[in-house]
Image (spheres, rainbow, N blue to C red):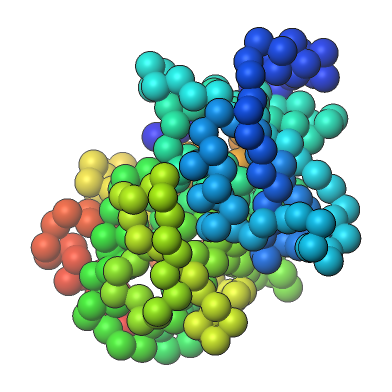
Amino acid sequence: MIENNWININSNQLEQLIEQHNFYYSQKIFSYSCKNICFEVFGQNKYLLTDLGVYFEKANEKTNIDFKKLYKIYIIENNKIKLNNIYFDRGTCSIIAEVNLSFGIIKSLINGVLTYHLGLIPVHGALINIDNKNFIIYGSHNSGKTYMIDYILKKLNNVKISTDDWIGIKLHNNTINAIGIDKNISSIHFNSTNFINLDYDKSKKYYNLSCSDINFTEGKVTEFISLSDTYSPKINLKEYFLKSIINTAYHSPLSLNDITVYKNFWSKNYNLIAKIHVINPFSISDQDRLINIIQK
């Protein structure tokens, strides 16, 4: 399910779109996943921008970091649309996001652009470690990722989490390495007292993975768990994987060229994946099967 329609524009088109709207507030933020990039977010909802400053890190005159690149994101709220239009001027690193507004959409958009900036292959999913074995649990929006992470944490005590939302993939020494991009998680069974109190987004309670909480940030991955309630064994597994893993990248820039790059990466390195499991997160038997898979 691709929720964002990425549209490449030039600087003249960017200026024309900006002139059509008023942006009353702005917030500069950055992520500890990549300290040399700063995001300046413009919008009409100060509470949303304030929450972004809480969720990420505020960048102001006291921030002693030498940012190498600045991305500007202009948020236009349009609750009548079902498909978000993301206009991207790659030359000026500027984005106009016409979205059916939610905090989750904007923070995932920032993580997606961050992954793009780092030159990584994006995956919308969780990266977990159990007994020194790494798993990626991926799926589209509302596919049940947080629900399944909660279930795993409830059932098992030896779980380490790198992220439960956004992953960057790279090839290293002929292995697939996964990097946790978003260090805040929404799983209610995570053992942490580092709450993030948000005013605009009260739908989820987020926890911050502090330095003491983060057990690992990067690791080799050979097993992927896809969440789907529509998959049938009659479907070719490789074709399903290539389509489903790319569809989770919708928060990262997705021109036709980007899709080709992502597809070529996974097609070329498919043989490096030991196992692909498809789990229906709403099936009790599949929930138990997932526990058995990750405990083997």
Q: Nearer the viewer, residue 117 or 54?
A: 54
**Residue 241, percent across and down?**
44, 48
Left or right for 93, reference 151: right
Image quarter of the N terminus: top left
> Could you tell me how many numbered marks the image carries?
0
Q: Is residue 48 visible?
A: yes
Quadrant where the C terminus sits is bottom left
- In the orientation shown, which residue stands out farthest toward the left? 284
* Snapshot quadrant of residue 193: bottom left
Give residue 25's quadrant in the image. top right
Residue 231: give x, y in percent of width and height. Answer: 26, 45
**145 on left or right of 60:** left
Q: Please give left or right for residue 6 compared with residue 239 in the image.
A: right
Indicate whether 257 appears above or below 265: above
Q: Nearer the viewer, residue 267 or 24?
A: 24
Residue 147 in which image quadrant: bottom left
Frontmost residue, 194 versus 277: 194
Residue drawn at the location 38% of the way across and 16% of the way down: 80
Residue 73: x, y in percent? 67, 35
Q: Identify which residue is drawn at 30% across, 69% down.
A: 188
Q: Position of residue 102 (x, y in %)?
A: 42, 38
Q: Nearer the viewer, residue 43 or 213?
A: 43
Q: Is residue 172 above or below residue 144?
A: below
| Residue for point 70% across, 47% down | 28
Say which residue appears at 44% left-offset and 81% top-offset: 160
Confirm whether residue 257 shows in the render. no
